[in-house]
Amino acid sequence: MNPEIITNNISDLSIREKIHEFLPKSDKVIIAVAFFNDSELIKQALEAGKTVTLIVSLRPPTSYYALKDILHKDNLNTLYLGPDFHSKIYAFIDDKKAIIGSIIGSSNLTPGGLDKNIETNVVLQDIDSLKQVDQLLKEIQDLSTILQPDKLEDYKERYDDFIKRNPPEKSSKRATKKGTGSFKISKKSSEYYEFWKVADKVKDLVKDISVREYPGIPVYLVVDHFWHWVVKICPPGRLSILKDSNDLTKAEYIPKLFEDYCKWDKSESGKTAPTYTESMPENSRKLQKLLSQDKIKMLDKDGALEVYRSFHATPRLIQRFEADNQFIGGNKISNIQESLDYLLYSDDAIDIRIHNMTAPNGKYKLKEFGPSCVQELLGWVYPTKMPIRNNKADKAIRLLGFRK
């Protein structure tokens, strides 16, 4: 098959569109690019069930925040090379482990590279060329290093300094217009990612049990009530073995604890259904409906109260301090609409959104809507993508031996 040459803004297709032609036929995608700041394509491939290997040059303008957004994801292998790496290779592999196509040219994994810039690339599908690409990618991967969270954090200061000296151009996109200031994100705001990684580890350990016991319920929701059981119900002596435990011990004991949680949850309801866990999707759907992107600007005070009263973190505050009334009385409904719209639908990285919602000078901070409310809402509205986080969840992962 003859090579195909595609140039963005000149050819009929953009490189992004050509990539989306290959994705449905692929089981695995390997992307080796110098610069990376568009995490959406990676997330789309992962959500479609693909395994992804991403290789980047860890230097500006490769985005710290785009890497942070995806580093925790299952089925993603992220590697990096130094400043001498400047290749741009996209390879698509089928379920028989054979490369079925490759795109090589000038397009980095950036909006400019995929759509906006006049970039030229060659699409290869002939066997001889693909064999060469396969060998080349193996050699590049051998030269690469796995990107660990601490290495990424080391890169953050360098990237932030680059952004200060080279501020991005303004665009018409809503989230970019709102901006992220100097990108000085509070440590507390960045902790959601670390929690997310732990939640994913637990989710992977118990997902088969969860699917069996609670079919059709997002595993993140089931795990959220498991946190309650760990903190409030499980005898402390059963958890002592997990203190300072290694991964093998966690892999052995956490599923056993989760089995007991399922029995407890179902016994709590007696013969009646649903159990609390089985009722959680209804709360999630209610919030999704109230806060859907086409309705959030019409949210009224009654709806905002319903949202606020749906969180695990708020009943005690409501009972002791009438926090729900303070939330409604202390914030204009237009500000509530704008802030929740930003939290749920902005293109900003998650930690930037959390920062802007919770920092003392945060652009979208609301009275009586603290970090637990912010991080719970993300999980309730996106229960298949993100975990619910609050103080009880943090305590649970410590008891399970993930943090000291």
Image: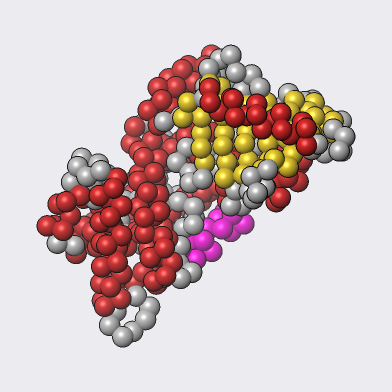
Instruction: Give percent across and percent down for residue 135.
Output: 65, 29
Magenta span of residues? 284-301
Q: Which residue appears at 47% of the width and 37% of the height?
A: 71
Residue 348 seen in the current view: yes
Residue at image location 52% in from the left, 58% down from the top? 291
Q: Position of residue 231 (x, y in %)?
A: 21, 57
As drawn, 50 above or below 292 = above
| Quadrant location of the C terminus in the rendered image | top left
* Image position of 197 (left or right of 82): left
Which quadrant of the view contains residue 210? bottom left
Measured along the vertical axis of the image, is residue 360 above or below residue 382?
above
Does residue 170 belong to the magenta stretch? Answer: no
Q: Which residue is at the far left?
A: 237
Q: Position of residue 335 (x, y in %)?
A: 48, 47
User: Which of the image's four quarters has the N terminus?
Assistant: top right
Q: Is residue 391 in view from this perspective?
A: no
Query: Which residue lies at the image location 51% right of the left edge and 29% below the top edge?
Result: 79
